[in-house]
Image (cartoon, rainbow, N blue to C red):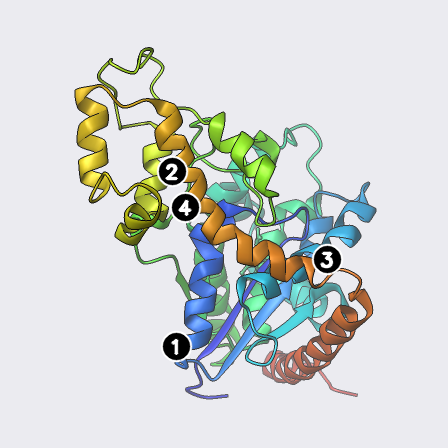
Amino acid sequence: MADKKIILTGDRPTGQLHLGHFVGALRQRVELQNSKEFDKIYIMIADSQAMTDNAKNPQKVQENVLEVLKDYIAIGIDPKKCTIFLQSSVAELTELTFYYCNLVTLARLQRNPTVKTEISQKNMQKSLPVGFLIYPISQAADITAFDATCVPVGEDQMPVIEQCREIVHTFNNTYGQTLVMPSGRVELNKKYRRLKGLDGSSKMSKSLGNTIYLNESSESLKQKVMSMYTDPNHLKVSDPGNVKNNMVFEYLDVFCKEEHFTKYLPEYKNLKKLKNHYERGGLGDVKIKVFLYNVLEELIAPIRQKRASLSGKEDELLKLLSEGTRVAREHAAATVKRVKKAMGLYLV
Ligand code: TRP
């Protein structure tokens, strides 16, 4: 275990993954996977965590397990290089959670900024499930069970990783050096960290209905791009336009490369030239939107195709998940043993 570089990360299966996930987290995972820097990579479909705010809607969680798995494979996560597993089938994670609960105060949980934001977004102030409040503890169990050194997450999850680090610190101080201290890792390029929604709101999110899915059909992609928020004062083509807070330009900043101009819009050399024209006036929204559509279609088409090739293969996918889960369970069981020993519990 010592000195190994191990990644653990995951997603709640509550819906299909979208471009916001891709930009903020998924793309980075594929890079890390291919970097060969890591001894082991675990990717967890966090169905137990998804239950913490979907207890009355379990079929939504169940239905999305395979959807998320398909998304993973379609974007290039390779099950030969990564162990993909299902959280609820690793009971050891629940066991660790129960022990870690004793090392965290209620006040500390209530202060976690990520959880606070989610509680208000989901209107859970009046009836907050205990399980949801303590999901950072269960996440600490997920991370430490696999001796993870590196936890790639979206920016908004960083306070949860911070809380995990506190738990590791407290555990090791109380019972002796047992758990590996993890570090969170966000997308290194700031520009890519958070993709705004189609409507210009601060985040692309399923609940806000402003998303582009990774398997969006070509027609629906076009429709969505055509409806994107631009500059409300840019009424006539001849009007000067604003590229700031203009979603088409914000997306082009993230997704377009110079070669896209050669292919789809050869009258401009690069994004700077396109922006200059827009700001001067004389460039209409339809033209920039069609260009963005082409750029995104080039990215999404292969993902959509790969994803389509997986439909009907549910049995194979479940087998893959079950094999990954078996490997994960073995690792987690070894950690639980170590943890119990450190705490001075009998192993009978
Ligand atoms: N909280 C993550 C999400 O919202 C999912 C998750 C569960 C996770 N356990 C984790 C992420 C451990 C990283 C590490 O999608």
Mark 3 secondary-structure assignment: helix
Give the camera-side residue of 274 and 28: 274
Report the residue marked by disc 2: 291
Residue 63 x, y percent position in the rendering: 78, 51
Residue pointed to by mark 3: 65
Q: Secondary structure at mark 4?
A: helix
Measure the C-alpha gap from mark 2 to mark 1. Answer: 32 Å
Q: Is residue 275 left or right of residue 284?
A: left
Q: Earlier in the sequence, mark 2 or mark 3?
A: 3
Relative to 315, residue 189 above or below? above
Asked if one can make out residue 158 in the rendered structure from this viewpoint, the answer is no
Q: Residue at x 69, y 63 (%)?
A: 309
Q: Amino acid at mark 1?
A: Ser
Residue pictured at 22% horizontal, 32% vertical? 275
Q: What's the distance in space between the residues labelled 2 and 4, CA to CA?
A: 6 Å
Inter-mark Cα distance, 3 to 1: 27 Å
The picture places residue 311, in percent across and down from the top left corner, at 75, 60
Foreground mark, 2 or 1, reads 2
